[in-house]
Image (spheres, rainbow, N blue to C red):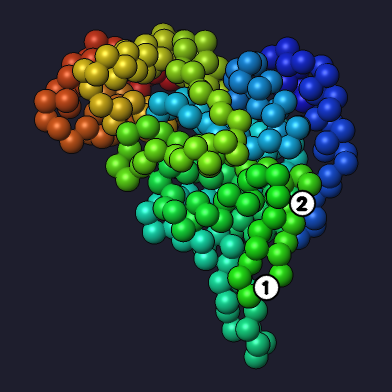
Amino acid sequence: MDFLREQQVSEGLIRDLEDFRARYTVDEAVQSRLAAPAIPFYGKKILEMSIAGLLQGENLLLTGAKATGKNVLSENLAYIFGRPVYNVSFHVNTSSAELIGTDTFRNNEVELRKGSIYQCAQYGGFGILDEINMAKNDAVSVLHATLDYRRSIDVPGYEKIDLHPAARFIGTMNYGYAGTKELNEALVSRFMVIDMPAQTEETLQFIMGKLLPDMKEQARKQWIGLFLDLQQKAENGEISTKSLDLRGMIAAGKTVRQGLDPFSSIEMGVVNKCFDIFEKEIVRDVVLTRIPEEWTCEDVY
């Protein structure tokens, strides 16, 4: 809550959030699913939009380009609301059985082995539906009744269950990934949609300061500048988003701390994620404008 106040998030929202946490306690069986995010999310407007929607019982769909912090925001929201997290990473083979559950034989009788959506509904968790636009129709059909005003799950062969009043779902999606498709209107209508903004120098300063606090100021500026340069080229269509990888840049910073030279680290974390030879050369040239080959780890830490 102190972090929300630092960002000047509405005091009214914070009070309602504290009331929500006091009203809905977490079952002891799922305490282990309460997890602090690796980094707080930075962005007052996005936080206020998200918190307001969730407090009113709405589900969220986070859209936008790669490296805009969709998963970071999802994890932060679950932590802020004090709810257990259930992650579902959709792919072309994700079926309704994986979400609801399947029959299993235990103690000499058939019983339901509960899926992630079922458990989320039962314990009032926050279900993070990652890459929801990769879900096939079989899986999407499960979500329709779960996400709308009915807030229930009809389990074939078992009784219907109603969602815990604290249960919420947060979907994330990237455009243009292999295997993705357009979401149909019926599914989109069940979400409040937030279009995540691109990273800025201010947000990157915050992220780098939290994850690589011991990096020298000059090196941090070059790391941030490199990401912004690649982001600009991706927006202009000069390169794909393969090299636009904030996780990779953070990982590169960590390997420099281990003693590897900065250019080799950036090659592993950024350049080598391009598999087209021409694109790789463009990215390498951009890197060289920011990270000289002669730099050593002492130039960074």
- Tell me which residue sits at (59%, 84%) in the image: 105
Q: Nearer the viewer, residue 260 or 156?
A: 156
- Tell me which residue sits at (37%, 32%) in the image: 175
- Tell me which residue sits at (29%, 31%) in the image: 242
Mark 1 element type: loop
Q: Are marks 2 and 1 in contact (CB under 8 Å)?
A: no
Q: Which residue is mark 1?
A: 158
Q: Nearer the viewer, residue 278 or 45?
A: 45
| Sooner in the amino-acid sequence: mark 2 or mark 1 | 1
Mark 2 element type: loop
Residue found at the far left of this picture: 278
* Residue 268 in the image, given as x and y percentages of width and height: 28, 34
Question: In the figure, 104 relative to 266: above or below?
Answer: below
* Residue 20 in the image, given as x and y percentages of width and height: 83, 36
Q: Nearer the viewer, residue 280 or 236?
A: 236
Question: In the figure, 258 relative to 179: above or below?
Answer: above
Question: In the figure, 281 relative to 141: above or below?
Answer: above
* Residue 201 in the image, given as x and y percentages of width and height: 47, 10
Count the marks: 2
Q: Is residue 137 visible?
A: yes
Q: Which residue is mark 2?
A: 164
Tell me which amino acid carries mark 2.
His
Q: Which mark is residue 93?
A: none
Q: CA distance from mark 2 to mark 1?
A: 18 Å
Q: Is residue 6 visible?
A: no
- Tell me which residue sits at (56%, 28%) in the image: 193
Question: In the figure, 164 relative to 182: above or below?
Answer: below
Q: Quadrant of the N terminus?
A: top right
* Residue 92 in the image, given as x and y percentages of width and height: 37, 54
* Callout 2 crowding tier (Cα within 10 Å): few <14, some 14–19, many ≥20: some
* Callout 1 crowding tier (Cα within 10 Å): few <14, some 14–19, many ≥20: few
Q: Quadrant of residue 116?
A: bottom right
